[in-house]
Amino acid sequence: MNTKQKEPVVGEVHFKSIPLYWEKEKNGVFLGHVLTSGKPGIYKDMWALAPGGGYPGAFPRGFINRLKKTGWWGNKRLWMFSGSFKDAGGTTVDIKPELGPDLVCNCENLELPDESYDFVCLDPPYSEEESSRLYGVPYVNLVKAVNEAARVCSPGGLVLLLHRIIPSYHPNDTVHFKRLKMIANVGVFKIGGYSNIFALTVWRKQEDLNGWLK
Ligand SMILES: C[S@@+](CC[C@H](N)C(=O)[O-])C[C@H]1O[C@@H](n2cnc3c(N)ncnc32)[C@H](O)[C@@H]1O
């Protein structure tokens, strides 16, 4: 019998009494909030929506309307990991050319200039297993993709991430990511049957690092 203990892959630590969740993944350790309820000034909500269309992982129905109603929209919109989603007034990016995105590229390295969008939404695969089973692609390096979103977001603009992880800190965070100030956490799930619950994390990009401290 193999008595060797398996290394834990997820766990919890506390920083100034805020519980933080950590997950060991291929690219290092990812640290995120388990609960941000203790953090003042962060908008919280729970959206129960109808399942989306046929594409695996498609946005739930009503998701876009809820974003607009909550006031999270922009004039120059970028959709990273766009899948089947289309936005005539925005730019879609996906690694799969057959989906017909405006830009076919790996979201770890966007071929787009700095600070060029005021609304950047990411909907990546939610795990390594789902990335391979549902889309047949290697699991994206989430730290790189979130840093890219922060880079192309203009000051005052929003970055929105739909994932199971709520990123708060990583040693490889760029100066752009450090300028993101979390403004909201929303639990999102699909009504009916067995449904995953996701976290929609919303950040606003500050003018500079001093702006973050205000
Ligand atoms: C959860 S689905 C997005 C679904 C989309 N929100 C919709 O409504 O159809 C994730 C998408 O990410 C794409 N993808 C996976 N890895 C990628 C990468 N490294 N760069 C760009 N796109 C990637 C997949 O092809 C897939 O279409």
Image (cartoon, rainbow, N blue to C red):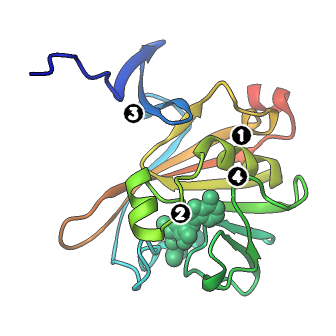
- The residue depicted at 81 percent of the width and 48 percent of the height is 151
Q: Nearer the viewer, residue 56 or 122?
A: 56
For marks 4 and 3, the one nearer the N-term is 3
- The residue depicted at 76 percent of the width and 53 percent of the height is 109
x and y percentages locating residue 50 in the rendered image: 33, 77
What amino acid type is highlighted by mark number 1? Leu
Q: Which residue is mark 1?
A: 180
For marks 1 and 3, the one nearer the N-term is 3
Q: Residue furthest right?
A: 113
Q: Nearer the viewer, mark 3 or mark 2?
A: 2
Q: Residue furthest top?
A: 16
x and y percentages locating residue 104 in the rendered image: 73, 73
For marks 2 and 1, the one nearer the N-term is 2
Q: Nearer the viewer, mark 1 or mark 4?
A: 4
Say few, some or many: other residues with alpha carbon within 10 Å of mark 1 (under 14 / 14 to 19 / 20 or more).
many
Q: Residue furthest front?
A: 1
Q: Is the shortest distance between ligand 1 and the CB of mark 4 under 8 Å?
A: yes
Asked whether, in this view, residue 32 is left or right of residue 75, the answer is left
Q: Image height check: is 125 above or below 49?
A: above
Answer yes or no: is residue 84 visible.
Answer: yes
Q: Which residue is mark 3?
A: 35
- The residue depicted at 30 percent of the width and 59 percent of the height is 196
Q: Nearer the viewer, mark 2 or mark 1?
A: 2
Numbered mark located on residue 108 in the image: 4
- The quadrant of the image that shows the N terminus is top left
Answer yes or no: is residue 72 visible.
Answer: no
What amino acid type is highlighted by mark number 4? Glu
Q: Nearer the viewer, mark 4 or mark 2?
A: 2
The secondary element bearing badge 4 is classed as loop
